[in-house]
Amino acid sequence: MFKGASSEIQFLVPDEIFPRHRHDFAYAAVVLAGRYLEAGDAGRRWVQSGDVILHREFEAHADTIPRSGATILNLRLEVCPRETGFASVSDVDEIVRCCERDPRMAADMIVLRAARADCQLFDWPDQLAHELRGDGTFSLEEWALCRGLAPSTVSRGFRRAFGVSPKRYRLEVRTQAVLGKLSATRETLARVAADAGFSDQSHMARSVRAVTGRSPRSWRA
């Protein structure tokens, strides 16, 4: 697992599974060879050579590596890009050569050149995750019943796909939105909480502390 050096080549062992986890720094994972399934706050997608995943601080994800295994180049990002998630680059070899000379320049190159890619909608868990990343204010029970599914089935199936319950996924997506706003605006904490869908400022503060270990005021400072 990437520990946060400026750059690192990582070999993902065939049939390995990394449970849902997060890092306290932003980084880019560039797939050099092989493929694997990433499921996280940006959705699910099979990534392969030429694909890039841009992670912001404390963004959670899980990885499932098939029998082919995979090789990735991890690059720490000094500044987290506004748009994170799945992307691609046209020339992986150029990124690797640049990284050998200057990892920071290679990271900047990725942020500037990466072309955004959508997550993949394999099944209803992906559709639910997509909707939770959007408005997210709907009733999970009603969502399940409208699709002929039992709420317990939705909870189990979603956890199997993303490593966390739908309610927890929605809470962490809202927390990510808060972290972005705290860094980019000077709005009051109460306004930030309301805009992100939290019931009140205290609820937001508890969630931010659970994810980052810091209070919203500390994060903003």
Image: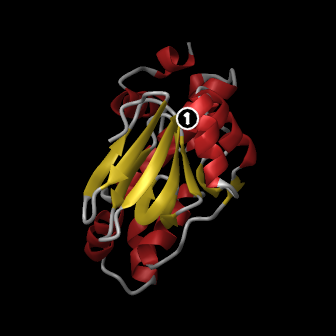
> Residue placed at 58% from the left, 44% from the top?
96
Q: Is residue 128 above or below residue 97?
A: below
> Residue placed at 47% from the left, 52% from the top?
41
Residue 146, given in percent of the width and then of the height, sits at 46, 82
Using residue 141 as the reference point, say whether residue 106 is left or right of it: right
Q: How crowded is the residue under tag 1: few (<14 C-alpha within 10 Å), some, or many (20+)?
A: many
Q: Label 1 sits on what residue type?
A: Val
Q: Quadrant of residue 142?
A: bottom left
Query: Is 180 or 74 nearer to us in this picture?
Result: 74
Q: Quadrant of the C terminus?
A: top right
Query: Is 142 or 211 nearer to us in this picture?
Result: 211
Query: Is 210 or 94 nearer to us in this picture?
Result: 94
Residue 60, given in percent of the width and then of the height, sits at 41, 46
Q: Residue furthest right?
A: 112
Residue 135, given in percent of the width and then of the height, sits at 59, 57
Q: Is residue 143 above or below residue 62?
A: below
Residue 175 shows in this picture:
yes
Q: Is residue 19 above or below residue 9?
A: below
